[in-house]
Amino acid sequence: MNFSETYRRMNEPIGPSPELIRRPPPKRRLPLRRLAAAATAAALVLATPALAVRSELGYQVLYRIAPSVAQFFQPVQRSCTDQGVTMEVVGVRVEGDTAQAYITLSGGDVDGTTDLFDSWSFHLPFDQIGRCERVGWDEETRTVTFLCTTQTMDGSPIPQGGKMTFSVRQLLTGKETLKDVAVDLDLASFSEEAETAPSWNLPEEKTPDAFYRSGGAYRDEQGEALNRSAPILRPGPALAEPAPGITITAAGYVEGLFHLQVCWGDLSQLDNHGRLWLEDAAGNQPRQLCSIGFLSDPDLAERKDYTEDLFDIPPEELGQYTLHGDFYTASSRTDGLWRVTFPLETT
């Protein structure tokens, strides 16, 4: 089959279905100028796919319209460099409904803890599910290796002769894990009633000084959420800093329950996270009644994410407990676009 025949067959499916043609037009229509511009852009992309895939915007538009065409014209590129970091595909395995690729990263801030921050994507002309896991670190060359796996959703074999594009947009480095940290905070000093802050979930509930509530409600003994929201404490200056960038910002009682609040910084930037618990001298840990998630206004430049845990402990018994936590942090994030394209064949 020659190139012209291949191109004709790939583009034949691109068009409205009979059902769509028979369907009456919607009452609400796009302005004529916008409709014409969109039609022109789509026509240009489909008319010159080989040129379209050379730009990021062109490739994304073509991939949304016709992924098979986009991948057909996407040139093989086994490595790329951005922000001083090089990504390279060094091995591929295809078997049945599964394709795997070993992807390496080197240069820049890359270290043995490098994380792709869930910013990776598989570009394939069929429905699929995928995952990525860090599997190796070479200290001498400062190269980290990921195993990226994708499978067809219906269990059918990976189509032969195709190409896969794998892309990454963000890298987290300098990650650190701190387990069972004893937090230096005298809990007995927070046995009094604490100041609360307003929160909102629906736009009509928003006020200038309110925090956006992302989740959290009281739970019963079986752990089922009750239809009643718990109040939150007003964040204040750092009371303790159990890990870099993670601070305890409030503690005290509201409605007879002990609240403990931690600020994780901006979760969209470094993905700091962890958990806190109370423990007595015998190692007993009281049950957590509720964990509330909230953040400062998402539209603000300096976003801060919080969680607040609630415990049913009488104020006179609070001094029997100490505070502990597990914490996961990162020191830097690198933004860019790393994209490799390679044939779906075992190498």
Image (cartoon, grey):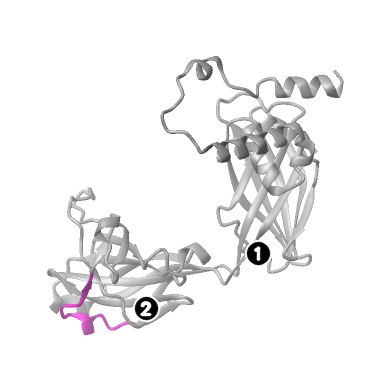
- Density class for disc 1 (Cα within 10 Å; few <14, some 14-19, many ≥20) is some
> In which quadrant of the rendered image does the C terminus lie?
top right
Question: Which of the pair 238/64 is nearer the observer?
Answer: 64
Q: Residue furthest front?
A: 32
- Density class for disc 2 (Cα within 10 Å; few <14, some 14-19, many ≥20) is some
Element on which disc 1 rests: loop
- Hey, which quadrant is residue 75 in on the image? top right
Height in image: 220 above or below 93? below
Q: Give, as a single range, the part of the protein colored magenta.
A: 184-197
Height in image: 23 above or below 292? above
Element on which disc 2 rests: strand
Q: Position of residue 38 (x, y in %)?
A: 61, 38
Residue in the picture at 31% in, 76% down: 235
Residue in the picture at 61% in, 23% down: 156
Residue in the picture at 26% in, 76% down: 251
Q: Position of residue 18 (x, y in %)?
A: 55, 14
Mark 1 or mark 2: whose residue is earlier in sequence: 1
Q: Which mark is residue 183?
A: 2
Q: Position of residue 117 (x, y in %)?
A: 56, 57
Q: Position of residue 124 (x, y in %)?
A: 66, 35
- Report if residue 123 is visible in the image: no
Q: Which mark is residue 222?
A: none
In the picture of the structure, the residue carrying the numbered disc 1 is 112
Q: The disc labelled 1 sits on which kind of residue?
A: Gly
Q: The disc labelled 2 sits on which kind of residue?
A: Val
Q: Is residue 166 left or right of residue 76?
A: left
- Hey, which quadrant is residue 202 in on the image? bottom left
Mark 1 and mark 2: Cα distance apart in space: 27 Å
Residue in the picture at 55% in, 25% down: 154
Q: Is residue 248 left or right of residue 1?
A: left
